[in-house]
Image (cartoon, helix red, strand yellow):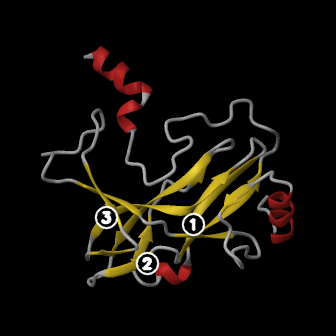
Amino acid sequence: MALSDKTIREYLEKEIIVIEPLAEHAIRSASVDLTLGNHFLTVDSNAMEIIRLDSPIAYREITAESITIPPHSFILATTREYIKVPPTLTAAVEGRSSIGRLGLFIQNAGWIDPGFEGNITLELYNANALPIRLDAGRRLCQVVFYHMDQEVENPYHGKYIGQDRTTGSRIFNDPEVDESVQSY
């Protein structure tokens, strides 16, 4: 069951959910708007010949108050907000309709596990034929919180816990990487 604005406010006041900073008017009827941070990553195609799932990816880091995403291009970004989700809730990050109508897809993994805390890394893709300029601090996406049927036994303690800026893929740290290497 998704949380209503009343419950979201109550949970924020009681610090059951933490969102910092929380912009004025960010709480919507069933979600909280999140804004764009000023840290970005792009895949450094000059440093690699191929992206592999079993090795680190080379990224070019950009810190800026605005960024332009070329047509048909991909970039990683971060939310300005740091969030903390208790082990009794889960959450989903969704793009805002007004942003999607510009041809900007927020293709993040989307799911926030119970127990996660950190800034949210967003995967942005410009599907338009024109560049899209984004400014830090602008509302870009929204987070929807859901009650779990009960508190989870194993809250999230994964490879992205506590991230405080845009974080590139750490898929090379997945446990099956070691297993697959050993099986050949």
Label drawn at residue 74: 3
Amino acid type of the residue that numbered disc 3 sits on in the rendered structure: Phe
Residue 135: which quarter of the image? Answer: bottom left
Indicate the secondary structure of the residue bearing disc 3: strand
Q: Earlier in the sequence, mark 1 or mark 2?
A: 1
Q: Is residue 19 above or below residue 31?
A: above
Q: Is residue 42 above or below residue 99?
A: above
The span from disc 3 to disc 2 (Cα, nearest Å) is: 16 Å
Observer-side mark, 3 or 2, equals 2
Label 1 CA crowd tier, 10 Å (few <14, some 14–19, many 20+): many
Q: Amino acid at mark 1?
A: Glu
Look at mark 1 in the image and give the residue it sits on: 94
Amino acid on which the number 2 mark rests in the picture: Asp
Percent position of residue 171, x then y:
38, 38
- Total labels drawn: 3
Q: Which mark is residue 135?
A: 2
Query: Residue at left 80%, top 38%?
Result: 151
Which quadrant does the C terminus fall into?
top left
x 35%, y 34%: residue: 172
